[in-house]
Image: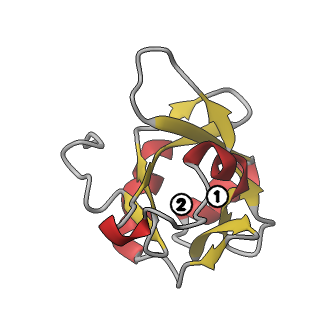
Protein backbone atom coordinates (compact mmCIF):
# COMPACT_ATOMS: atom_id res chain seq x y z
CA UNK A 1 0.00 0.00 0.00
CA UNK A 2 1.47 3.38 -0.97
CA UNK A 3 1.19 6.34 1.33
CA UNK A 4 -0.78 9.49 0.51
CA UNK A 5 2.40 11.56 0.45
CA UNK A 6 4.05 9.35 -2.16
CA UNK A 7 0.97 9.52 -4.36
CA UNK A 8 -0.39 13.00 -3.63
CA UNK A 9 -1.10 13.94 -7.27
CA UNK A 10 -3.19 10.81 -7.79
CA UNK A 11 -4.95 11.22 -4.42
CA UNK A 12 -5.89 14.86 -5.00
CA UNK A 13 -9.18 16.10 -6.44
CA UNK A 14 -9.79 19.67 -7.60
CA UNK A 15 -13.35 20.83 -7.09
CA UNK A 16 -13.59 23.82 -9.37
CA UNK A 17 -10.81 26.41 -9.22
CA UNK A 18 -10.98 27.19 -5.50
CA UNK A 19 -11.15 23.89 -3.55
CA UNK A 20 -8.98 20.80 -3.56
CA UNK A 21 -9.10 17.62 -1.51
CA UNK A 22 -5.99 15.61 -0.72
CA UNK A 23 -6.95 12.17 0.57
CA UNK A 24 -4.98 10.53 3.35
CA UNK A 25 -4.85 6.78 3.95
CA UNK A 26 -8.23 5.57 5.14
CA UNK A 27 -9.14 4.24 8.55
CA UNK A 28 -10.69 0.79 8.27
CA UNK A 29 -13.35 0.11 10.90
CA UNK A 30 -15.47 -2.98 11.47
CA UNK A 31 -18.69 -1.95 9.71
CA UNK A 32 -17.83 1.34 8.04
CA UNK A 33 -14.74 3.05 6.74
CA UNK A 34 -13.74 6.67 6.53
CA UNK A 35 -12.20 8.35 3.54
CA UNK A 36 -10.33 11.33 5.01
CA UNK A 37 -9.52 14.42 3.02
CA UNK A 38 -7.53 17.55 3.74
CA UNK A 39 -9.35 20.59 2.36
CA UNK A 40 -7.34 23.37 0.80
CA UNK A 41 -8.74 26.59 -0.63
CA UNK A 42 -7.11 28.67 -3.31
CA UNK A 43 -7.64 32.43 -3.28
CA UNK A 44 -6.31 34.37 -6.22
CA UNK A 45 -4.56 37.65 -5.56
CA UNK A 46 -7.44 39.48 -7.24
CA UNK A 47 -9.93 37.90 -4.80
CA UNK A 48 -9.35 40.38 -1.94
CA UNK A 49 -12.90 41.74 -2.14
CA UNK A 50 -14.43 38.48 -3.28
CA UNK A 51 -17.47 37.12 -1.51
CA UNK A 52 -15.98 33.61 -1.67
CA UNK A 53 -16.95 31.83 1.58
CA UNK A 54 -14.38 30.99 4.24
CA UNK A 55 -13.20 27.37 4.32
CA UNK A 56 -15.10 26.56 7.56
CA UNK A 57 -18.35 27.63 5.86
CA UNK A 58 -17.74 25.05 3.13
CA UNK A 59 -16.57 21.99 5.07
CA UNK A 60 -20.00 20.45 5.66
CA UNK A 61 -21.04 21.30 2.09
CA UNK A 62 -18.36 19.19 0.38
CA UNK A 63 -19.61 15.85 -0.96
CA UNK A 64 -18.51 12.78 -2.88
CA UNK A 65 -20.57 10.24 -4.81
CA UNK A 66 -19.49 6.72 -5.68
CA UNK A 67 -21.42 4.87 -8.36
CA UNK A 68 -25.18 5.14 -8.09
CA UNK A 69 -25.06 5.68 -4.32
CA UNK A 70 -26.33 8.91 -2.78
CA UNK A 71 -23.98 11.81 -2.26
CA UNK A 72 -22.31 11.76 1.12
CA UNK A 73 -21.24 14.96 2.78
CA UNK A 74 -18.05 15.32 4.75
CA UNK A 75 -18.00 15.62 8.51
CA UNK A 76 -15.56 17.94 10.18
CA UNK A 77 -12.56 16.35 11.80
CA UNK A 78 -10.42 18.97 13.52
CA UNK A 79 -7.22 18.49 15.40
CA UNK A 80 -5.40 21.13 17.40
CA UNK A 81 -2.03 20.35 15.81
CA UNK A 82 -3.32 20.44 12.23
CA UNK A 83 -2.90 23.53 10.09
CA UNK A 84 -5.25 22.18 7.42
CA UNK A 85 -8.93 21.43 7.77
CA UNK A 86 -9.79 17.71 7.61
CA UNK A 87 -13.11 16.17 6.72
CA UNK A 88 -14.11 12.55 6.57
CA UNK A 89 -16.61 10.73 4.42
CA UNK A 90 -18.19 7.69 6.04
CA UNK A 91 -18.56 4.97 3.41
CA UNK A 92 -21.07 2.15 3.71
CA UNK A 93 -20.22 -1.44 2.74
CA UNK A 94 -22.02 -0.99 -0.59
CA UNK A 95 -20.08 2.18 -1.37
CA UNK A 96 -16.81 0.39 -0.64
CA UNK A 97 -17.81 -2.49 -2.95
CA UNK A 98 -18.64 -0.02 -5.72
CA UNK A 99 -15.44 1.88 -5.03
CA UNK A 100 -13.34 -1.27 -5.33
CA UNK A 101 -15.06 -2.06 -8.64
CA UNK A 102 -13.82 1.41 -9.73
CA UNK A 103 -17.33 2.74 -10.25
CA UNK A 104 -17.55 6.36 -11.30
CA UNK A 105 -16.78 8.93 -8.63
CA UNK A 106 -17.73 12.59 -8.41
CA UNK A 107 -17.09 15.33 -5.90
CA UNK A 108 -18.61 18.74 -5.35
CA UNK A 109 -19.54 21.61 -3.10
CA UNK A 110 -23.16 22.53 -2.43
CA UNK A 111 -22.98 26.17 -1.27
CA UNK A 112 -24.91 29.17 -2.68
CA UNK A 113 -21.66 31.09 -3.33
CA UNK A 114 -19.71 28.08 -4.61
CA UNK A 115 -21.89 25.38 -6.16
CA UNK A 116 -19.58 23.10 -8.15
CA UNK A 117 -19.56 19.48 -9.34
CA UNK A 118 -16.53 17.77 -10.85
CA UNK A 119 -16.49 15.74 -14.02
CA UNK A 120 -15.96 12.05 -13.41
CA UNK A 121 -12.87 11.58 -11.22
CA UNK A 122 -9.91 9.96 -13.00
CA UNK A 123 -9.79 6.15 -12.77
CA UNK A 124 -6.21 6.39 -11.46
CA UNK A 125 -7.49 8.37 -8.46
CA UNK A 126 -10.35 5.96 -7.82
CA UNK A 127 -7.97 2.98 -8.00
CA UNK A 128 -5.48 4.63 -5.64
CA UNK A 129 -8.17 5.43 -3.07
CA UNK A 130 -9.78 1.98 -3.41
CA UNK A 131 -6.42 0.34 -2.53
CA UNK A 132 -6.93 1.52 1.07
CA UNK A 133 -9.93 -0.81 1.43
CA UNK A 134 -8.32 -4.06 0.26
When the figure is inspected, residue 112 is found, relative to residue 20, above or below; the finding is: below
Label ID, residue 120: none
Report if the CB atoms under discs 1 and 2 are less than 8 Å apart.
yes
Tag 2: Cα neighbours inside 10 Å, few (<14), some, or many (≥20)? some
Residue visible at 57% across and 25% down in the picture:
78
Dot 2: element: helix
Q: Is residue 111 left or right of residue 117?
A: right
Nearer the observer, 99 or 111: 111
Residue 123 in the image: state x and y as whole percent. 41, 75
User: Which image quadrant: the N terminus?
Assistant: top left
Marks 1 and 2, how far apart at CA:
5 Å
Q: Is residue 134 visible?
A: no
The residue that mark 2 highlights is: 100
Residue 22 in the image: state x and y as whole percent. 39, 51
Residue visible at 41% across and 15% down in the picture:
81
Q: How many marks?
A: 2
Residue closest to the far left: 6
The residue that mark 1 highlights is: 97
Dot 1: element: helix
Residue closest to the far front: 49
Amino acid sequence: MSSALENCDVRSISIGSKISLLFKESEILEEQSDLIGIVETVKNQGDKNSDFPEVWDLLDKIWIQIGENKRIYGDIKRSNDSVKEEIFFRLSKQMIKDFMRTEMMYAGVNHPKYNVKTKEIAISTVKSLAEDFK
